[in-house]
Image (tube, rainbow, N blue to C red):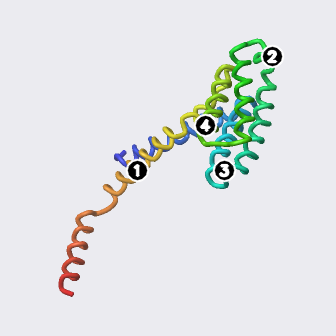
Amino acid sequence: MNDFSKLALGITIVILLTSTFAGTVNAQGSERENYKNLLNTIDGAIRTFRLRGENSASMALKVAENQYGHFKSLYENTIRYDSRLSNLDNDINAKFDSLQQSPSVDGIRDLRGMVSEMANGLGVELSFLYKYAFIIILFVSLVLAFSVNMVSRTIVDWEKVNKVKRKSEELKNKL
């Protein structure tokens, strides 16, 4: 078994493990899904603010506020009896109200942080793939870059490429 076959086998195993892990993560509860959708909507409000302005961001924040209401309704008793979570809930509601009047990117980011803090206090976390997506994408791209590099080193006849390059330079110099 040559180096290329070992590398291809290793990449295949990593991809299979990642896809299997993704399947088990997707089978988790609706609370996590609601939380993920809420964060996506809040992130979408930032994108909307940058692309379309304040009015569109206010509409996206109204949708996010409705999603937050649905999310927190699943934990109403927990929030009611925990003073820290109750205060945080009041702060989040006030932040939603103020941002709908005058949205800002920093304010929306603060809101996202507050919602994340609330979810952590309730014991709801994002899936591993969603939480560390940047690191996973970086890892996969580095593995693919390494594998393409290895393939080009083993398959391409670099002596022949350099010979053709020298020949083309000679022809170019003659003209």
- For mark 4, give the secondary structure: helix
First in sequence, mark 2 or 1: give its number.
2
Q: Which residue is mark 2?
A: 77
Q: Inspect the image, locate mark 4, and give the three-letter code of the amino acid beneath it.
A: Arg
Question: Is disc 3 in contact with disc 1, using a CB cutoff of under 8 Å?
Answer: no
Q: Mark 2 and mark 4: span between their CA atoms?
A: 27 Å
Query: Could you say which quadrant of the image residue 91 lies in?
Result: top right
Please state if 34 lies on the left or on the right of 106 as rendered.
Answer: right
Instruction: Return the mark for residue 145.
Output: 1
- Residue 109's disc is 4
Quadrant in which residue 127 is drawn:
top right
> CB atoms at circles 1 and 4 under 8 Å apart?
no
Q: In the picture, residue 95 is in which quadrant?
A: top right
Between the residue at mark 4 and the residue at mark 3, the CA separation in whole angstroms equals: 13 Å
Amino acid at the residue labelled 3: Thr
Which of the marked residues, 3 or 1, is nearer the chain's N terminus?
Answer: 3
Name the residue nearer the viewer: 91 or 147.
Answer: 91
Residue 121: x %, y % from top left: 66, 19
37 on left or right of 157: right
Report the residue at 65% width, 37% height from top: 23
**Residue occupying the point 65% across, 49% down:** 49
The residue tagged 3 is 48
The answer to whether the residues at label 3 and label 2 have Cβ atoms under 8 Å apart is: no
Q: Is residue 17 left or right of residue 79?
A: left
Please state which of residues 3 and 144 is positioned toward the viewer in this rendering. Answer: 144
Of residues 16 and 45, which is closer to you in this image?
A: 45
Residue drawn at x 69%, y 22% is 88
- Amino acid carrying label 1: it is Ala
Marks 2/4 in contact by CB < 8 Å: the verdict is no
